Image: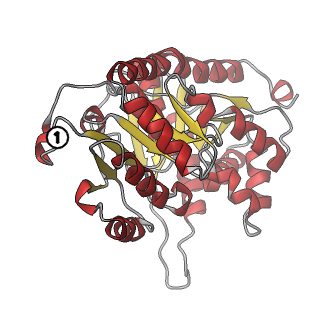
Amino acid sequence: MRIGICCYPSYGGSGVVATELGKHLARRGHDVHFISYDKPFRLDDFQENVHFHGVETADYPVFKHPPYIMSLANKLAEVAEREQLEIIHSHYAVPHATAVMLANQMLGGRLKTVTTLHGTDVTIMSEEDSLKQVMAFSVNQSDVITAVSKELARVAEEAISPKNPITMVHNFINLEEYRRTTNQTVRKCFKIDSSERVIVHTSNFRPVKRIEDVIKIFHGILKGIPARLLLVGDGPEQNKAYELAEKLGISDKIEFLGKQSRVVKILSASDLFLLPSEKESFGLAALEAMACEVPVVASNVGGLPEVIEHGVSGWLSELGDIDSMIEGALHILKDEERHNTFSKNARRRAQEHFSAEILVRQYEAIYEKLMHSTKEETNN
């Protein structure tokens, strides 16, 4: 099949999953074309059957904000016509579903279209007055709508009232890339003693990630065992993390690593992952940790219970329950044999339920069914 993928090129989960999906589809013999304003950061090597088409926006003085959606729609139509694309798959509804809808109308509606909802494109945009109607309308023009967790599918069905049920396809991970290594560079770099447990958190440091909770949980862990905290990423809440660490007198036990394009070495040096988020449509960061044999202590919200087995591969606590998360962390970390069991269970969970091999085939099956359906069948 000849497939177009419209996504964000940045570090966010939607861009990562879209890029990995395209790369795996290309390995399976499909011709894959990425369309975005910049090259996705995961497209860092040449790969057969993978193409990238950049979108340039018109920049005239009359425009306060360059009209990206129109430029994107124009590029989508141009590429689809020239490359004879059969399917365009948009990831993250805003603005991609609208641009795909416009491009398809320009081409007489001949394309099959899929939209994957990733989280905030529904949970936030569906409540934004300036966007919610056009977002819902555009998504509903897609032949198939998918969501990355059962919980997100439920929320989306309430928000946009789709004409057909939303298909759930979980996010996935490349298990060949995300696996624990014996590389000790991280521990050596920060002079971490062998007696210290390494706790890690990765995010964009937005309020929804509850970074202050991460610091408080770590403070509680320190009261029970020697430990270090590695914080990966940056964002608007970073200063609050600095300030709270200073106030609690634990800043010397915390390393701020900033944005990292590859986290396997960091995860491989870690013993526990913290994710006390207010919302998580799926929890890709948790899955990456689990694949590297790192158990996860997290909030029992969104799609996280679909990823983490409480008491088996991690620990789930109610939102904001710092004491429970500290209890869960120490329960896992204090006993070496128990920690090893949790670690192996985390990897097993990733292998059995979230491998690229399993989930890329699900997307492939959606495409194949679309290709053999008529417009009437798609709408029923």
Observer-nearest of 315 and 86:
315
Drawn side of residue 64 relative to residue 121, left or right: left
The residue wearing badge 1 is: 187
Residue 211: x and y in percent read: 46, 58
- Visible in this render: residue 156? yes
Which quadrant holds the C terminus? top right
Does 80 sit above or below residue 370?
Answer: below
Which quadrant holds the N terminus? top right
Observer-nearest of 187 and 114:
187
> What is the basis of the colouring in this image?
secondary structure
Residue that appears at 34% across and 67% down: 242
- List the single residue furthest toward the bottom: 61
Badge 1 amino acid? Arg
Observer-nearest of 287 and 141:
287
Count of marks overlaid on the render: 1
SS at badge 1: helix
Does 60 sit above or below residue 27?
Answer: below
- List the single residue furthest toward the front: 224
Residue that appears at 60% across and 20% down: 362
How dense is the environment of label 1, judged by Cα within 10 Å: few (below 14), some, or many (20 and up)? some
Residue 300: x and y in percent read: 63, 40
Drawn side of residue 200 relative to residue 158, left or right: left
Give the image quarter of residue 240: bottom left
Residue 358: x and y in percent read: 53, 16
Residue that appears at 80% across and 60% down: 133
Residue 233: x and y in percent read: 36, 55
